[in-house]
């Protein structure tokens, strides 16, 4: 399943977690180790740029964090990121440079590459969002199946057993998710793809696609 590999989804030059991500073939293999990696990386961060704010919490001095935000470690917030009013970080989160985590957005066990935007009423759990990925207002990652069985990634007839009970979505670089969409457990969206608003998405969506609804996916026209 080549299209779901890390190298196909992400430009690693846009994440403080690049060395960690390099270790995996598929991004969901990284989910179980995010907390441990943060605890290893945090003490090595430049004290001129980062402050240790609590147990296993490192925040860049240039980041903007609203006083009403709730931050739990392990957590790294990189430079120029913005954590807005009433954001809730439950822990095991890496928030990249220039990211926006907005009002009432909740993060849990995630890696956000640089300049990701989850700005309005989003839930992002057990997920990895690539460079400049954007989730519209109210869009969420659903990270547990209703029957509580282990998540399987499906691309047509091809399947990969992940062995994970909790697995939200893997979004490649520059993915746009429309408002009020639900990304079901095991969703993988290729680079540069767009998801229509109010969509219910599952499986692997090819790079450069426009997801309109289940069974209707158009390839984006390339400019001359």
Image (spheres, rainbow, N blue to C red):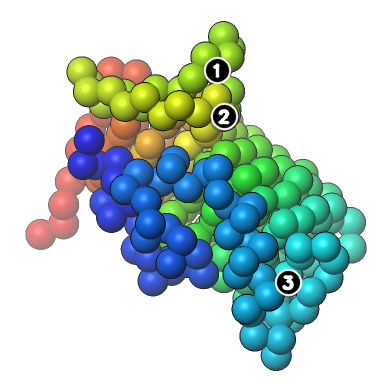
Badge 1 marks a residue whose secondary structure is: loop
- Which of labels 1 and 2 is toward the front? 2
Residue ID for mark 3 = 59
The residue lying toward the viewer, choosing from 224 and 129, is 129
Cα–Cα span, label 2 and label 3: 27 Å
Q: Which residue is drawn at 46% across and 61% down?
A: 20
Above or below, 131 relative to 16: above
Cα–Cα span, label 3 and label 1: 33 Å
Q: Which residue is drawn at 63% across and 79% down?
A: 45
The residue lying toward the viewer, choosing from 93 and 79, is 93
Q: Residue at x 80, y 53 (%)?
A: 72
Query: Residue 22 is drawn in which quadrant?
Result: bottom left
Q: How crowded is mark 2: few (under 14 residues within 10 Å), some or many (20 or more)?
A: many
Residue ID for mark 1 = 145
Residue 30 location, x and y as percent?
A: 47, 47
Q: Residues within 10 Å of mark 1 (few under 14, many from 20)?
A: some
Badge 2 marks a residue whose secondary structure is: loop
Question: Residue 166 — which label?
Answer: 2
Looking at the figure, which quarter contains the N terminus?
top left
């Amino acid at each position: 399943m080549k299209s779901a590999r890390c190298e196909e989804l992400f430009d690693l030059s846009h994440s403080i977690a690049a060395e960690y991500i390099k270790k995996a073939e598929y991004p969901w293999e990284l989910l179980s180790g995010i907390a441990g990696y943060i605890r290893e990386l945090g003490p090595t961060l430049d004290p001129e740029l980062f402050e240790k704010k609590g147990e296993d919490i490192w925040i860049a001095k240039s980041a903007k964090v609203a006083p009403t935000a709730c931050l739990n470690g392990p957590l790294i917030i990189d430079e120029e990121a913005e954590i807005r009013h009433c954001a809730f970080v439950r822990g095991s989160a890496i928030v990249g440079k220039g990211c926006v985590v907005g009002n009432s957005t909740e993060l849990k066990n995630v890696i956000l590459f640089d300049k990701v935007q989850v700005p309005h009423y989003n839930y992002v759990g057990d997920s990895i969002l690539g460079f400049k990925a954007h989730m519209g207002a109210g869009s969420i990652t659903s990270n547990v199946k209703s029957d509580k069985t282990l998540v399987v990634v499906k691309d047509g007839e091809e399947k990969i057993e992940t062995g994970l009970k909790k697995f939200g979505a893997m979004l490649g670089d520059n993915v746009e998710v429309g408002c009020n969409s639900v990304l079901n457990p095991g969703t993988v969206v290729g680079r540069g793809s767009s998801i229509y608003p109010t969509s219910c998405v599952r499986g692997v969506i090819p790079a450069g696609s426009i997801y309109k609804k289940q069974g209707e996916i158009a390839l984006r026209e390339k400019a001359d």
